[in-house]
Image (cartoon, rainbow, N blue to C red):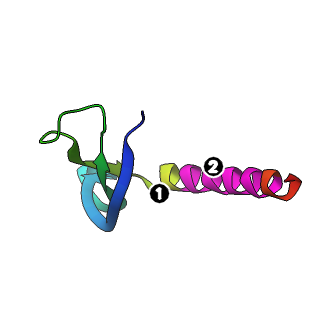
């Protein structure tokens, strides 16, 4: 069995990253917090929180792929 998503939360974080001429610039990133339940683990270890940091480019890629998945599921649902 695969882990199941129970809940999620997200926020935007502004990080300081190295820029040109040694200056530091602020760069936004999305932090995604996932609460998952892993049925393959014991009862007291099966719930955990996983945090993922996504850059703007990575977030756009994930959203594009979820859009493709949604379109494929809609196509399959229309066949039935």
- The stretch drawn in magenta includes residue 69: yes
Task: Work out whether 38 lies above or below 73.
Answer: above
80, 37: nearer the viewer: 80
In the displayed structure image, the side of residue 6 where residue 78 appears, left or right: right
Q: Residue at x 29, y 31 (%)?
A: 40
Secondary structure that dominates the magenta span? helix
Q: Residue at x 28, y 64 (%)?
A: 13
C-alpha gap between disc 2 and disc 1? 14 Å
Residue 28 lies, in percent from the top left, at 36, 63
Mark with earlier residue (2, 1) = 1
Question: What is the magenta range?
Answer: 60-75
- In the rendered image, which residue does mark 2 sit on? 65
Residue name at image x 42 percent, y 33 percent: 1
Residue 53 rendering spot, x and y as whole percentages: 33, 50
Q: Is residue 46 above or below residue 35?
A: above
Secondary element under disc 1, as helix, strand or loop, is helix
Front position in the image: 22 or 6: 6
Mark 2, mark 1: which one is toward the viewer?
2
């Amino acid at each position: 069995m695969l882990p199941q998503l129970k809940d999620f939360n997200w926020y935007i974080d502004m990080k300081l990253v190295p820029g040109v001429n040694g200056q530091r610039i602020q760069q936004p990133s999305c932090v995604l917090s996932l609460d998952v339940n892993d049925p393959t683990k014991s009862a007291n270890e099966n719930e955990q929180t996983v945090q993922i940091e996504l850059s703007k480019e990575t977030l756009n890629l994930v959203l594009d792929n979820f859009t493709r998945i949604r379109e494929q599921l809609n196509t399959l649902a229309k066949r039935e």
